Image: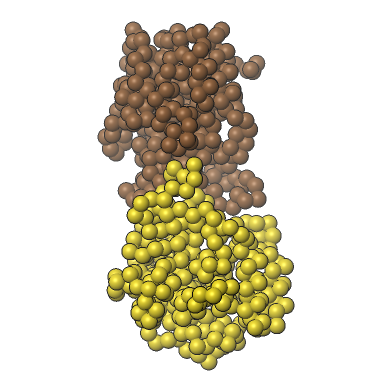
Chain colours: A yellow, B brown
Amino acid sequence: MTDAAPLPVYLDCDPGVDDALALAYLLASPAVDLVGVGTVSGNTSAEQAARNALDLLALAGRQDVPVAVGAHDHLTHPYDGGAPHVHGDNGVGGVRLPRSSAEPDPRGAAALLADLARVHEGELRIVAIGPLTNLALALRADPALAGRVAGVTIMGGAALVPGNVTPVAEANVYNDPEAAAEVLAADWDVTLVPLDVTMEHLLTEADRRALLDATAPFPRAVGAVLDHYFDFYVPEFGLRTSPLHDPLAAALAAGGIRADRAVRVPVAVDTTDGPGRGQTIADLRGQRLGPRHHEGARTTVVLSTDAPLAPHLLETILAGFAA
Amino acid sequence: MTDAAPLPVYLDCDPGVDDALALAYLLASPAVDLVGVGTVSGNTSAEQAARNALDLLALAGRQDVPVAVGAHDHLTHPYDGGAPHVHGDNGVGGVRLPRSSAEPDPRGAAALLADLARVHEGELRIVAIGPLTNLALALRADPALAGRVAGVTIMGGAALVPGNVTPVAEANVYNDPEAAAEVLAADWDVTLVPLDVTMEHLLTEADRRALLDATAPFPRAVGAVLDHYFDFYVPEFGLRTSPLHDPLAAALAAGGIRADRAVRVPVAVDTTDGPGRGQTIADLRGQRLGPRHHEGARTTVVLSTDAPLAPHLLETILAGFAA
């Protein structure tokens, strides 16, 4: 795919069904070297998310990747119990994965991230597909972290489309708006992948079948994990499908798919207790004649991509796990 | 246009360049009987807005329409000085209109509205194209007002497009969010005409020329008033033009143009002091498969119309003032 050295990636996640797909992609992509995983409460608890990540990595034969448990509670409020109606009672669609013998890295997610940022100074890319609590805690512990990473790609927010938790708020940001505000205000380059674009990339039942029909255990498990999630989206799309929220952030970070319409603009997070709590407020005024980037803004909001993700995602996962 | 008796309309406004166009339309439309005008501070002060309304009505030969000065300050904060960069230093693009000898109705806008709602009980339609202070004050004075009017059509808000004052707030709502919240929570049917749809209806320089070339003085004055406003929109649209914000609300109220995509959903107004202040938060989730109205919601958000407004607007004004 590329002759360059693979990109060292730290994945901050809350698997989570679409997190499992993103993890599969990052493991399979030859452009990526997954150097660590931190978990956070969101779709499920940080502890359960770590168990799921360990079990998924074992299925992939990748027990070498450290998995650290991150924040159970959010910066200003406790974990709310997750989204079992979306992600199943265990975060992976109710599927009982074979239990890995591996245990979480004792450092904790924020410390693991800080260590990896030193080891891969100037090269590490953070892919954050859960609430941003761990990133905020790592920045609080050492603001210089921001200068050590190459960039941050975040699945989160909604710019000009409705939210998925409130009329204006997306789940990852809504679950910890204070953390999101701190992460977006930090001195690093952020690529924000909001619902505006993730809701436009769908995995079909045929795609899911292709995963189930794979010979390797990891893609087959991911196909099974998706079953419950496909049901959840029937009222929205009128068919069994899955928007590719987290995999899209992973693929954009890896360069496997590129942004088409994307603008660098100020993005505020609503941390009030009003009806806008958890909204990502991107300043998208004045974009009618073409992209207008704001001087000094560090956040790029992705609004469309140059290709549909599903074919690339499927091809990458099936090829990576056939090898 | 219609065999039915013309609709009695109370116009609450802050002329205002596009207010002048809306006023021209309401006077010219055979479907409308304009029974009163109230003014509010917004584009310019309530006092100046009343002077402009009186002068415009005199040009139209309609000194019989009462014009009452409404709120100078908003519910929780003082008038901020208006938008002279958009509407000129006098609210009508800097054009010096011939001064009418008529003076404002002594009742004040909220009292005029209350009186008209009794005279035209069950039939009065309110068209509100400025900040909603007067309507909120009238409701506070007598909540039963809500049951006496046929409906309220409001130019205001932004649902899934950027605002025009902040990244998420439109000027009329931003100028008095507390009033907008009270008006949208009242027990009456509201048609909200937000930037989502008003920014899609443009008047061209050729249209403006047609107004300037009219024989009647009112359309000619409106053509002149538009000159400054056309310049303001060049950075947004790349040409001299005017979005038809206020005229669209007027034409939808009069039935001269009909909503195409419109959904009845809960709409909250952000009255916090956070970055979302003044935003209209319409719950537009789950509309992908077609319009989904919410049981019990009283606000219909118009997202598109069945025809472009400009031809109908121009034809109505030119025909109405040629007669």
Residue B193: percent from the left, percent from the top? Answer: 51, 35
Q: In this view, does A106 lie above or below B77?
A: below
Q: Nearer the viewer, residue B286 or A198?
A: A198
Where the C terminus of chain B falls, by quadrant? top right
Where the N terminus of chain B falls, by quadrant? top right
Instruction: Name the residue at 59% across, 30% down.
Output: B308
Q: Which of B247 and A47 is in front in this view?
A: B247
- Work out whether residue B280 can be spotted: no
Indicate the quadrant where residue A92 lies: bottom right
- Work out whether residue B271 can be spotted: yes
In the figure, is residue A88 to the left or right of A274? right
Instruction: Name the residue at 39% across, 87% down.
Output: A106
Q: Is residue A229 above or below residue A289?
A: below
Instruction: Name the residue at 45% across, 62% down.
Output: A191
Residue B194: percent from the left, percent from the top? Answer: 49, 37
Residue B126: percent from the left, percent from the top? Answer: 48, 26
Residue furthest front as drawn: A3
Residue A63: percent from the left, percent from the top? Answer: 52, 88
Indicate the quadrant where residue A3 lies: bottom right
Instruction: Name the residue at 40% across, 31% down.
Output: B232
Q: Is residue A92 above or below residue A165?
A: below
Q: In this view, does A38 lie above or below B195?
A: below
